[in-house]
Image (cartoon, rainbow, N blue to C red):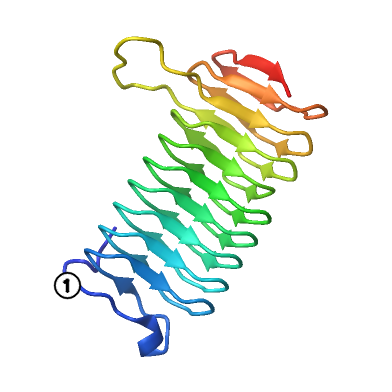
Amino acid sequence: MFRYLATLGFAVSAVALGGTADISRVNGSIVVEAGRQAGDVETVNGSISIGRGAHVDDIETVNGSVRMDEQVTATSAESVNGEIVVGAQSEISANATTVNGALTLGKGARVGGKLENVNGRLTLQGATVQGGISTVNGDVYVASGSRVDGGIHVAKNSGWSLGSKPKNPRITIESGAMVTGTLKFEREVDLYVGAGVTLPVIEGVPPQRFAL
């Protein structure tokens, strides 16, 4: 990760080079303009914005958000401290992952790999995830028209908890949404299910179930 940062401390403009050059910097945000092409887009301290209809490879930041406009294509999107927003009809062919931050997929968006975080809400607004969803403390909202293949995994929280019991993650699957694979819960969750939804196999800690 960030294999170019040792030699590049400034942004390289893919527009200026007229091709699909990588764009890399240490400090500062990066904007790829609408309709442009670039290779890997990487920063350490800063956000990354990809304009409508742009095509890029891997998107990576440590401290900052990733925002993809509509009809963007990318290989992967990754952050450590920051949210990832994937616009309508955009596509990530591999994984979309962050540690501390929300993950939001707009209508018609597709992630070919896994959607994963530790802390933060995961929202599918009529989107598709083909490699499953994984979180530790995040709420998961699968809206009508969405599809998740590969199941939903809520991992055990191995951190220390002082005082009151931590809030259960809320897993919501609306009517008209589909989840295939396994619902694997390593901790207690609140599972809200819309009418007509057929749930896959549930493993691990039995959830608290509610009807929408």
Residue sitting nearer the eye, 31 or 145: 31
- Label 1 Cα neighbours within 10 Å, binned few <14 / some 14-19 / many ≥20: few
* In the displayed structure image, the side of residue 75 where residue 180 appears, left or right: right
Q: Quadrant of the N terminus?
A: bottom left
User: Looking at the picture, how far across and down is residue 111, in whole percent?
Assistant: 57, 53
159 is higher (above) or lower (below) than 141: above
> Which residue is painted at 65% across and 42% down in the image?
149
Q: Residue furthest right?
A: 196
Amino acid type, callout 1: Thr
Picture quadrant where residue 190 is located = top right
Residue sitting nearer the eye, 72 or 184: 72
* In the displayed structure image, the side of residue 56 where residue 10 appears, left or right: left
User: Looking at the picture, how far across and down is residue 174, in whole percent?
Assistant: 72, 33
Picture quadrant where residue 30 is located = bottom left
Residue at disc 1, secondary structure? loop
- The residue that mark 1 highlights is 7
Q: Quadrant of the C terminus?
A: top right
User: Looking at the picture, how far across and down is residue 182, in whole percent?
Assistant: 62, 29
